[in-house]
Image (cartoon, helix red, strand yellow):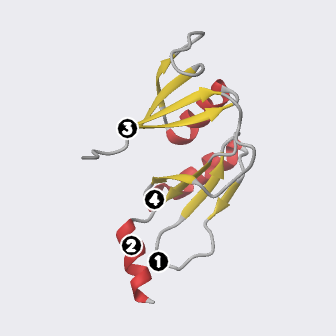
């Protein structure tokens, strides 16, 4: 039986740059760095975002941007805080998208290696309920 997500791994060109990205935006805590050692396919760092294990490994960036993404839940009260953090970092940010009203607000943004992230205020139940109204 699946118990949940174990970890998520991102391949990134610059481990230190991604470390700053994760710690600044997500308040990630670095819990491991391989340094010059290679236990997997390349140098790596591990982080915790809340209790979610995020791994980053040195490698080639994605060649293009897609809509494949990882969404984190935030409160409506924290929306402006995260919007300001993203803007101060200078990453490409899209506030929301054309969608049905009432299913939460979103901030979409890419990291330096073309990975798309979302910070979302809504829940699955809110979205399903709103879709059922039409």
Report how far apart the C-alphas of labels 1 and 3 lie in the structure: 31 Å
Give the structural element (helix, strand or loop) at label 4. helix
Secondary structure under the numbered disc 1 in the rendered image: loop
Task: Single out the mark in the foreground, 1 or 4.
Answer: 1
Q: Secondary structure at mark 2?
A: helix
What x and y, as percent, mark residue 55? Answer: 50, 31
Q: Residue furthest top?
A: 36
Sort mark 1 into few (<14), some (14-19) or many (20+) by Cα contacts within 10 Å.
few
Mark positioned earlier in the residue sequence (2 or 4) = 4
What label does residue 126 carry, if any? 2
Q: Separation of disc 3 and disc 2 at Cα?
A: 26 Å
Q: Residue at x 53, y 23 (%)?
A: 45
* Distance in Å between CA atoms under marks 1 and 4: 16 Å
Q: Which is nearer the N-term, disc 3 or disc 2?
A: 3
Residue at the image point whose x is 56% and y is 14% from the top: 38
Image depth: mark 1 or mark 3 in front: 3
| 123 lies left or right of 42 | left
Pointer 3 residue: 6
């Amino acid at each position: 039986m699946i118990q949940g997500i174990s970890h998520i791994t991102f391949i990134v060109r610059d481990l230190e740059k991604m470390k700053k990205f994760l710690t600044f935006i997500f308040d990630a805590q670095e819990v491991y760095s391989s340094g010059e050692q290679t236990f997997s396919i390349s140098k790596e760092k591990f982080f915790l975002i809340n209790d979610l294990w995020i791994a980053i490994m040195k490698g080639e960036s994605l060649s293009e941007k897609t809509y494949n993404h990882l969404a984190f839940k935030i409160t409506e009260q924290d929306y402006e805080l995260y919007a300001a953090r993203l803007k101060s970092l200078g990453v490409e940010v899209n506030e929301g998208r054309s969608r049905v009203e009432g299913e939460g607000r979103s901030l979409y943004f890419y990291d330096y290696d073309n990975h798309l992230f979302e910070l979302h205020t809504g829940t699955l139940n809110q979205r399903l309920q709103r879709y059922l109204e039409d």
